[in-house]
Image: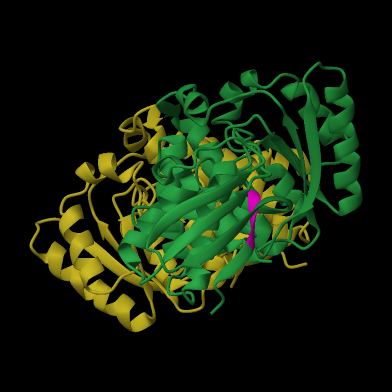
Chain colours: A yellow, B green
Amino acid sequence: MSTAIKIFSPATVANVGCGFDVLGFCLDTIGDEMLIRKTTAKGIKITKIEGFDLPYDVKENVAGISALAMYEDLKPNCGFEIEIYKKIKPGSGIGSSSASAAGSVFGINAILGFPLNKTELTFYAMKGEAFASKSEHADNLAPAIFGGFTLVKSTHPLRILELPTPKNLYATLIHPQIEIKTSEARALLPDKLKLSSAIRQWANIGSLVHGLHTSDYELIKESMTDVVAEPYRKELIPYFDKLKAAVLKAGALGCAISGSGPSIFALSKGKKTAKIVEQVMNHVYSESDIPFETYVSKINQEGIKIL
Amino acid sequence: MSTAIKIFSPATVANVGCGFDVLGFCLDTIGDEMLIRKTTAKGIKITKIEGFDLPYDVKENVAGISALAMYEDLKPNCGFEIEIYKKIKPGSGIGSSSASAAGSVFGINAILGFPLNKTELTFYAMKGEAFASKSEHADNLAPAIFGGFTLVKSTHPLRILELPTPKNLYATLIHPQIEIKTSEARALLPDKLKLSSAIRQWANIGSLVHGLHTSDYELIKESMTDVVAEPYRKELIPYFDKLKAAVLKAGALGCAISGSGPSIFALSKGKKTAKIVEQVMNHVYSESDIPFETYVSKINQEGIKIL
């Protein structure tokens, strides 16, 4: 059992178009690094944060909160120090808080010899996520911890399904550097949904799950429509309609808001198309004054890992 | 090419708990028989109806309406006579009108040498179904024509997905002989749905599709909850709650209203459990004054067929 491990905690995309609040997938070229060190002194301490200005107080930091919740239940005969090398910008819509919340519990679990399974880790990570987004949800945490595509069937009790990933599926992302708070993006949504819209959404989710199982890229394409959140949230993201139209024209299977935004993702069959989609995203946003970053990533089947 | 064929057109279960308006599966021990005969005289005629009192006027009979819609598009150089041996009671909630609508188009297509595929047949059958239920839907037609479990992704354009069927899955049905009109059962439902209920429903649909793909009977069990229609429609069916509780206690994976009722179905792993569930259904309804019938059926993977 090592006394310190370094981990990679990946960025993730929640909702995936039709799967509002339940679907997500894992990225592999974007993520935080964290170092978890076992100490003889008891308790949890955050000893280093690089990349972004985040609180060192364990009870004010998502990585600290999730670690503490797990620590208090497991009551190990040691303590832990956490170093956070934050690369995913908070508020980018690609699971920044989830990466932190998942990273600390994953690291501690590894040092302790893996007493908890992935669902149990997600349970504790949700405590940190709840602090960041004001609601206990797992649609970013599940793909970070399990890898691939995940479906959060329910949070109480926590039930996570691992869906298969077609092998030629790539994601392209653009992160326009504007601020959208998850809580604000959520407040935009009406409390009630037309039954006809709900039916369309659940037909699409069923179809997307079937498309992932059968590696049916055409069906994945047809299923990625979001009639629930996108019509409201896209107003928060400049150039959304233009970017989406251009990206689909360039051959992407689908394009939607990542989580509650502002990042936008596209799925493509093959890396070549995903790269072309990246160029198109660059081209559309070059017209704006908004700083942005783009990424291309294979779907990360492994999830969070020890480096 | 034969000049007359006899077919079996099966009963079906729509909605399947969580899949309101989109999911369905096919039964194999209950269904109508129909005889379709090629004639030199042009046009469509219904020449015999046995079992139930239904209109002979082609434009007033679902089998006639669907046949006519297809006939007018294909313009074959012949006509057809239809004999209907109706075994599925109209209004029972197990796809009686769908069996009729599907049967005539399937039979004519077979006599003509199969010019249309199954989706095209469903398209024409929907014309008859629309006459019966006042809305163009395919959630009973699709399983009748394709067999197994189906997901109607959309009706415009018509897109039907064939889902896999775990091999030990059996259905038990009870048909309490009370009348519920589809249009009335539909009017009971609110136009809008709480977002939280909708999310629960689409998590369940995604899970059920995953469970069918992975033959995960436990997941199928967990996914069969209907938070959309059942809370309203169960009031129309005496003893629903009591029957459901007893059936689940007896080992059924799930129990829900078949289509818009009044039939109730249960899914079980294995024929033995399905038979026990049938006894339990019988026991519960024996207390009532309502006449009823029960059935046990393997999921019919083939669908409508030539006898």
* B14 sits left or right of A284 in the view: right
Q: How many circles with numbers are drawn on the protein? A: 0
- Residue located farthest toward the bottom when viewing the structure as drawn: A272
Compare residues B3 and A232 and report the one nearer the observer: B3
Q: Residue at x 34, y 42 (%)?
A: A229
Give residue A7's position: percent from left, percent from top.
57, 66
Is residue A178 visible from the viewing direction of this image?
yes
How far across and how far down the image is residue A145, in percent?
A: 60, 58
Compared across the picture, whether A187 is left or right of A234 comes to right
Camera-nearest residue between A91 and A169: A169
What residue do we see at 49% from left, 23% from top?
B184
The relative height of residue A116 versus residue A192 in the rendered view (above or below) is below
The residue at 46%/58% (across/down) is B122
- Is B10 contained in the magenta span? yes
* Nearer to me, A134 or A113: A134
Residue A251 shown left or right of residue A196 in the figure: left
Asked if residue A13 can be seen in this view, the reply is no
Relative height, residue B151 to residue B162 (above, below) = above
The reply, left or right, for residue B32 in relation to residue A212 is right
Q: Position of residue A111 (x, y in %)?
A: 72, 61
* B270, above or below B94, in the image: below
Q: Main secondary structure of the magenta part?
A: strand
Q: In the picture, residue A1 is in which quadrant?
A: bottom right
The magenta segment: B7-11
Q: Is residue A26 magenta?
A: no
Q: Quadrant of the C terminus of chain B?
A: bottom right
